[in-house]
Amino acid sequence: MNRCSYQEVEDMELRIDDAQLDMDAANLYEDLREDDMLEILGLNHHPRDAVYMSYSCSSKCYSVKDEMNNLYCSFGVAPIKGTNIGSAWLLGTRRLPTIKKFFIKNSVERMEGLLDGFDYLTNFVMRSNKLSIKWLEWLGAEFQDCQFQGYLSFVLERK
């Protein structure tokens, strides 16, 4: 895995598209943020498997890309079998911190769409994954302790 750093993105054309499993999953896995990788490993999953399962199990899935098709992150929701509850997820590349303002501003409207068809969305987040927690707080998530040490569960409901 390459370990390069990225500069803050300014004045670059960014967009949120429907995710493309074949291309986006491979690009995400190759440049997965360390916090996301540690979060996945802490739940006893292999990062590659978690990335591909996130895309393939999702009923709605989006990717943030720039004008050169560089991937910044993907996010989506997977139905929890036998319920009317969705499992929300966000996985980012090391580029994600360079577009925090764009992502926060533009993901709120997508979140409303992710909630369509579900009573609410839920999942777990590692307490040390500050970027993900800030995003979830911005979206209005409610947090509580859970059975996994070092993690919080969260719930997102319609505003």
Image: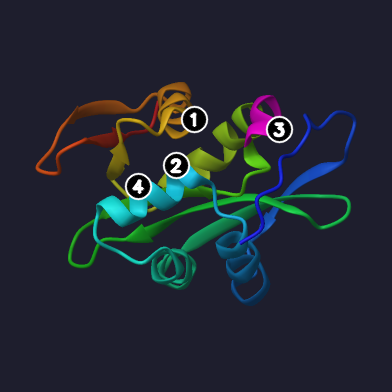
- Which residue is drawn at the image coordinates 70% and 32% (left, top)? 99
| SS type, badge 4 | helix
Q: Report the side of 108 relative to 37 (left or right).
A: right
Residue 131's disc is 1
| Location of mark 4 (residue) | 39
Between the C-alphas of marks 2 and 1, the distance is 9 Å
> Residue flagged by tag 4: what amino acid is it?
Glu
Badge 1 crowding class, 10 Å Cα cut-off, few under 14, some 14 to 19, many 20 or more, is some
Q: Residue type at mark 3?
A: Thr
What residue does disc 3 label? 98
Expressed as whole percent of the image width and height from the top left, the position of residue 152 reads 23, 34
Q: Are marks 2 and 1 in contact (CB under 8 Å)?
A: yes
User: Between disc 2 and disc 1, whose residue precedes?
Assistant: 2
Q: Which residues are magenta?
A: 97-102
Is the residue 56 above or below the residue 68 in the image? below
Magenta part, dominant SS? helix
Secondary structure under tag 2 reads: helix
Q: How is the image coloured?
A: rainbow
